Amino acid sequence: MDTLKSASEVVSIKSLSRWSEMDIPKYSPSDQFKESPFPCRPDLNQKLRISEENGVYLETMALVHPTSENLREPNKFTDQVYEVAGPDLLKEVKNEILHCRTGDAVLTKGYHLRARYLIHTVGPRFNIKYKTAAESALYNCYRQTLLLAKENHISSIALGAIHTARRGYPPEEGAHIAIRTIRRILEKHADAFDTIVLTISGIDESVYPDILRLYFPRSEEEEQWAVDLLPDDIGNADGEPFIPERKIRITGDPTNRDEDGDFPFSRGIGESPDDDEINARGHAFTSVEKDPDAIKAANMKKRKSEELSDFELSHRYERLLRKARTEDLSDFAAHRCIYQSGVDTFGRPIIVFVARNFPATTVNLEKALLYIIHLLDPVVNKDYVIVYFHTLCSSANQPSFSWLKTVYNSLDCRYRLNLKSFYVVHPTFWSKLLIWYLTTFTAGMVKEKVHLCNNVHFLYKTIHPDQLDIPPFVLEHDMRQNPVNYQDDENSDGGSLSL
């Protein structure tokens, strides 16, 4: 029996917008023509369509299912896939597929889904220590998925973000790999695909359109605009991320020959000696110096990219703001982890964040970002302060560093310029370390505005107690930790950011 809920939920791909037909921003004319590694290709652009649906009800030949190694990762999308496909899908997975490795892809039938096939793929968990491995695995997910579709003569495919927030992958970094790999596959196998539907939702709605313009420019003006915004690593001819270790060549040392008397060389796995290696055999020195001119050019490109990023950020923020104003955020508001509370002695609005009330491991982080924007957007047009209570915070209340970085990069310049003070009450060693790292490597502009407060009374130097809505558990904890302050208000301590 077909488990589709209603015919109205079936979405024809013909009803979806083509990327080539979507609005193209106006770009200023470029002073000079610059050759792009991703030139405008109308034939490729018309193969891309955009959908805010998750793909379950799309009429494509295949639907991509990002999942875990046992193909049954517990999440809303997987639950919906199995529910609509019916019990036969679970039987096939349990009896025939069993397992899929990270970075690989496997094919099953779609059963009661509108898609004839399901392509299951396992994305990597992101860890900054193993960033190179995560990038390589994510690239393989997209490449193997599309090549598997090609091998099975699947001409239309619904493909969402494999770099999921559940696995901690930064949305923007993942989108670069995803879209770049799709571009390179289409360049080599354009005839194999009629339509690739990018199913984007949540934070990806704000990320994908900007990055699509870099790899799939729709006009010569957009192509020239995109050249300066492309990242330094645009991958190889297949889109695979560049791994520096594979490109280093170490010339021989005359005192360190092999058994045959030849100089040893370091190559990538499976590589044959190239001309550079053969010519280098006559040299008796090791050299891995970088070209100073190349370094200078890269720095100039980086500065140009940073100048243009304000334009990108503004458009991205406006999209998030529109969504924040229309989406129902009452579920997140009910946690009461962030709210406005009076003004300080200078008349500046106070935003309170209660870490213990923030269910970081269970809350929808996309909605959390939207709620932050919804609450702060009308406040940050003028000076404001933030009071962050870290009191009795546990690991369940602490979001990942990658999400904090995403939030920081999603907010426009008003948030940073008009923030006058950021008070952190009851910090722990680990919270101090995180704040130091965040303000050193990501949010340097706010570093001097951060104040670590060992007790609540430090706040009363610039904020009257009547203007602060402090949760009772915070005051109870503070009374236990600093009883003397409740006997003599003059004995209070705090400090600026230092570790």
Image (tube, rainbow, N blue to C red):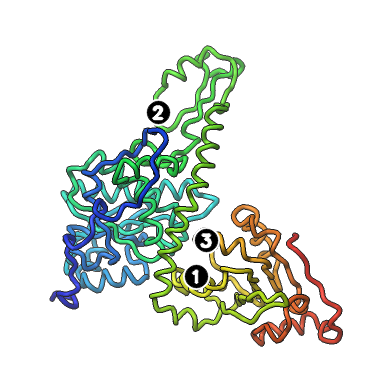
Picture layout, residue 138 above or below residue 86: above
Q: Amino acid at mark 3?
A: Asp
Direction from residue 351 to residue 459 in the image, left or right: right
Mark positioned earlier in the residue sequence (3 or 1): 1
Image quarter of the C terminus: bottom right
Mark 3 nearby-residue class (10 Å; few <14, some 14–19, many ≥20): some
Residue in the image at 56% along x and 28% along y = 290
Gap in Å between the C-alphas at discs 2 and 1? 50 Å
Gap in Å between the C-alphas at discs 2 and 3? 46 Å
Q: Amino acid at mark 1?
A: Ile
Picture layout, residue 37 above or below residue 129: above
**Which quadrant holds residue 331?**
bottom left
Picture layout, residue 232 above or below residue 101: above
**Disc assigned to residue 412:** 3
For the question of whether residue 390 can be seen, the reply is: no
- Rendered location of residue 15, percent (x, y): 18, 63
- Rendered location of residue 122, percent (x, y): 36, 57
Q: Amino acid at mark 2?
A: Glu
Q: Residue furthest top?
A: 282
- Rendered location of residue 339, percent (x, y): 57, 79
**Residue at mark 1:** 373
| Residue closer to the observer: 385 or 92 | 385
Q: Are marks 2 and 1 in contact (CB under 8 Å)?
A: no
**Which quadrant holds residue 485?**
bottom right
Q: Are marks 2 and 3 in contact (CB under 8 Å)?
A: no
Q: What secondary structure is marked by label 3?
A: loop
- Rendered location of residue 276, percent (x, y): 46, 19
Q: Nearer the viewer, mark 2 or mark 1?
A: 1
**Residue at mark 2:** 271
Q: What secondary structure is marked by label 2?
A: loop
Mark positioned earlier in the residue sequence (2 or 3): 2
Image quarter of the N terminus: bottom left
